[in-house]
Each structure stands twice: as C-alpha cells, then as structure tokens.
Amino acid sequence: MLEIRWHGRGGQGVWSASILLATAAIRTGKYAQSFPEFGPERTGAPVQAYNRIDDKPIVIHSNIYEPDIVIVIDPTLLENAKAILSGIEPGGHLLVNTPESPDQIRKKLEVPEGVRVWTVDATTIALEEMGRAITNTPMLGALLKAVPVVPLDAIKTVVRERWPGEVGEKNIRAIERALKEVKSG
Amino acid sequence: MQKVVKQRMMALNGDEAVAWAVKQSNVDVVSAYPITPQTLIVERISEFVHNGEVDMEFIKVESEHSALSACVGAAAAGARAFTATAANGLQLMFEILYITASLRLPVVMVVVNRAPSGPINIHCDHNDTMGARDSGWIQIYTEDAQEAYDSTIQAFKISENPEVLLPTMVTLDGFFISHTLQNVSLLPDEVVHEFLGVRKVPKIKVPEIHGDKEVPLMLNPRYPLTFGPLDLFDYYFEHKRQQIEAMMRAYKVIEEVHREYAEISGRSYGDGFIEPYRIDDADVVVVGLGSTMGTTKTIVDELREEGKKVGSIRVRVFRPFPRERLKKVLCNFDAVGVLDRGISFGHYGQLYTDLCATLYGVKDAPAMIDFVYGLGGRDMPPKLLKKIFEEVLEARVKGPEPVFRIKGVR
C-alpha cells in the first residue's frame, strides 16, 4: 500500500489534488482513499490531505503517520521542516514545489539519507500555463514522474471531467510540463 | 439464489455514498437541516432534486426538530421519508425521535457520528447516537462508505416490513468515513427499485370507525385515523409492549434483508449483526463499532503474523442488540477488549455495559476490559490498537483489572 501526504495552504487545493489522484486510481481498477486533514477549512493556514492507494481493498481508517510520499505544493511551508518530514523514512520520496534544486532542499531541510528528493518550479509552470499560481495539479504531474502511481491518461481524464473545456486543458499542459521538468537528487 | 448483479465502481466519500443510496431508493420526502459532517448528504440530495434526477419532495426547514417532524408527517401520510443529521442536530430531534418510533413510522435517518458539544467539536465519537439508543430506533453502525451505502438501502426495507414498522438510524463515523473518498460499488437503479419496491402501507381494521372495511394505516382523509393521541395508563403500556415486541421481530427481518441484499450485491457484513474477523482459534478478541474496526483488522493480521492468536468482532447492529449471538461467540475466548468511542459519565462505555449485561451469569464468560478511546475525533492510531491487544492478551494471565481504561488521552 502506498501512503501519500500532501502539504499546502487552505484554498490551494491539496484535498482536490488527492481526490483527483484517488479517483484516477479507482478508475484504473485500484483501491484508494482520499481524505483531508480533518478540521474546519482555514484559508491560508497550513493544511494537509492524504491518499492511500493499493491493489486490494483498503480497510484501515486511521490517519497516516508514516507516508511513503510527501508532496509540498507551497514553498513557504518549508520553514516548518519538522512537519514536512514527519514520519518519512528511507525509501520514501519528498516532492517539493520550489525553484531550488533537490540538493539545496536536502541541505535546507536536513532530509534523512535514503529519502529521495524531487523538485519542480510548479508556481512558474502554473503562472505560465494557467495564468494563476495554482500548484496542486502540476504537482500531480511531478508525482507521476517520481512514482508512476497511475497512468497519465487516467489523470487527464479526471482533470477534464472536473474542469471541462479550456480550464482542463490548461491544467493538463501544466501537469505534462511538471512531469517533464521535475528533477531528482 | 439470485445472481450478483454487475455494478458501477465509483469514487465517493461516505456522505456522497449515502446520497446515492437515497437517490436510488425511491424516497418520496427528504427533510433535513445542514450540520457538519453530514451537510454533504443533503447538499447532494438537493442537487439531485434541483436537477430533476429524482421525483422527491425536499422540504427545507428551520431546525432539526422540524426536519424530523416533517418526516413524521410525511411517513404518517404513507410516504417513504428520509433525513440526516449529526450530534447537536440529533439532540434537537430528541423529542421527535421517540415520537417517530412510538407512532411506528418507518423513517430512515443517517447520522454522521459527531461528538456532542461542548466544547464545540465537529469530529467523530459515538456519544450522539448512543444518547438515542433507548429511543426505539433500530441502530446500524457502519464501517466504511460502501457499507453506509448498502445499509441505507437495507434500512428502508427493514423499517417498512409490516412485522417491524420502526424507524432505522444508520450511522457512519464523521470525517473518518463521511469525508473519506473510497471505492464504492453502486447497484443499478432498477435493481434497487426492485429490491425496495414502493412503500406498502399495511391495512388494518378499526371496527369502531370504519366497520368491516380494511383501511390503510396512514393519514388519509377518506379513512380518517388518529396518530399519537392521548394515551394514559389505560393503553400507553400496551403500546410500549408492542414496540418491545416489534424490536424482537426485527432480528429476523434484519438478517433476512441483509441476506437478500448480499445475494444481489455480493456484499455481506458477517451475519448482518456481528462481523467476526479471524476468530476461529483466537484466544482473545477486540469488540467494537464503526470505522475503527477496519483498522483493527489490519492489526489482527499483523499480530497473527507474529503468531498471536487474536481476532476481532465488529458489532454492526446495536439496537436490537445481538445479545444471543454475542453471548454464544464471546464465551469462546479467554479475554475480550471492548472499544467504546462513547462514555456514560459515571459508568462505563455503552457497548461494554451492554456486553456485561449480555454475559451476566454465563458460565465461561471471558474476562472483559473497557477501552474508552477517540472522543471528539481523537484518532485511534494502529500503534495504540496494538497496545490494546497486548493488554487484552495480558489479561489472560493477570485478569482484567482495572476493567476501565481510557486510551489515547493526556
């Protein structure tokens, strides 16, 4: 079973991203969960969302304490390295939206050995492709490069359902660019 | 036996799954008032109504007291009625809960379990529905969104059975289930329609008013009847006795409806009342309600790999309480840990109390410990569950004292 924790700020769409991912996984015959950090929605405050994805039915209903993948969609959250790195173990992946390199992030956050760091400038991609700094969908593209949890086409399908027309196509362009541009270290 | 039908796999959270069940169940009247974490249910239903996807009357009201009152009126007029609420909303309905059950109206209500105020909390515990356990409603506690969907459909068939005619409360854990999206298989609309049919109102004879004619047991101007009039020491007690007996008859109906549904859907939850997991050669088991029991299964698997003989039993139907089943099964174990996400202040958790009453005087009754956990949505982490199992295993040697243990609290 794969467990994912998304970090963002209220209103940036971490829950939406986790819903898109889980829906795409379910459509491709997998079992999945998506849930928000349980609490009232607070615009601008640090919030988290979660995914579980597996090939068999998922019966666990507790919070996620040891994620395999941590995704940070807002670089201003990196100040709280403790929250970002909580529970992540060697073999895990840390994906960050930042113009910095994976090495810079590894040093800055003191990422443990064995955790693979991935970075992508999702904010710039979002601004260029969508005209708004919406980084949740591009980070889905980065995720698919780091760990191909679901096929890109499955993500495209659910994005087009969620935002039919031009908005969906812009999101897809941002997703595809992030998938190409994400770097690991 | 019927063939399992082909189903549609959807990605839905618990609230949405319930809304879909209601959409497919040919419900005539929905009246509800929004309250977190139930709001999504009525939001989705109102969208279905607005889009013309259902032939349903959605009555907007100013409070939960009115929401359930509207359902009472609708059900008394022969309609299939549904409402949903949580915590404080359920408490505001309290007066009408008893009235619904006493008037023998087959209203179905989904309660998304939320800790009652105060201090104000929107997260899960079971103290809201436990407070309503004596109101005369059938209570079904579900483990995940799929079961919430399945149980909501089953609830109409159970409640409307002429042998039962009691309201049913289906519960799901706030946020843990209500806001968690997962795989949910939906039956085709026509299969649900066929399973439930339209509500049939039983016919009765009231010779004093209607002579030999059989009249429908409903509010109908052609055949006037009175529901819920003054009923003092002359007949009130007889009506209560009928409620007691109806609950007893519900055992068989709940089991039958669960079995019939399993044949169509391919899904069953134990025998409909209790869901045992890997108990065959178990020395100890943990018993509980709701979503935590899914997590418990994963811990049972882990401990089994370590060679420990442990299992779990989820109590799905809390009223009528499956006492005969539990009495029979629990005597097979040395020790039993009871998980209570609720507390009767000044006593124990509600499930523990009922299990004690069930096992009183029974030869070979197991040592039993009450673990109160998770109030106000406090998570039950896998590690804590593991520790609870270890304490239950220890009780085999050391005995169950202290029998009351609060877990995951500062």
Image (cartoon, rainbow, N blue to C red):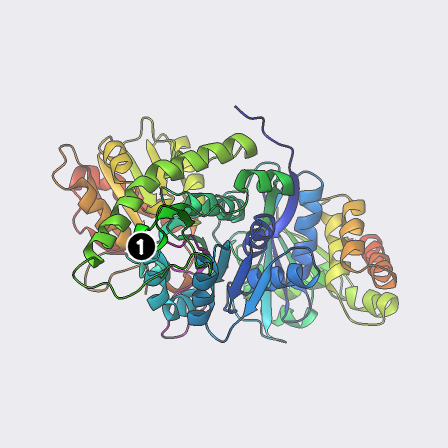
Question: Is residue A52 visible to the viewer in this orientation of the structure?
Answer: no
- Judge from the rendering whether residue B294 lies leftward or rightward of residue B248; answer left or right: right
Q: Per the image, is B113 magenta?
A: yes
Q: Residue reaching furthest front?
A: B211
The foreground one among B271 and A71 is B271
Classify residue B119 by image quadrant.
bottom left
Q: Is residue B365 above or below residue A116?
A: above
Q: Is residue B211 above or below residue B227?
A: above
**In what quadrant of the picture does the C terminus of chain B appear?**
bottom left
Amino acid type for the residue under numbered disc 1: Gly
Taking the magenta stretch, the answer to whether it contains residue B89 is: no
The residue carrying mark 1 is: B136
Residue A125 horizontal/vertical position (percent)? 83, 65
Asked if residue B358 shows in the view, the reply is yes
Which element is circle 1 on?
loop
Instruction: Report the front residue among B73 and A83.
Output: B73
Q: Residue at x 52, y 55 (%)?
A: A87
In the depicted view, which residue is nearer to us: B375 or B8? B8
Q: Chain of mark 1?
A: B
Residue at 19% of width from left, 50% of height from top?
B403
Q: Position of residue B246 (x, y in %)?
A: 30, 45
Residue B32 picture location, percent across and down: 51, 66
Residue A17 image offset from top left, x and y in percent = 69, 58
Provide the residue span drawn in magenta.
B104-125
Q: Residue furthest top?
A: B1
B195 horizontally vs B87: left or right: right
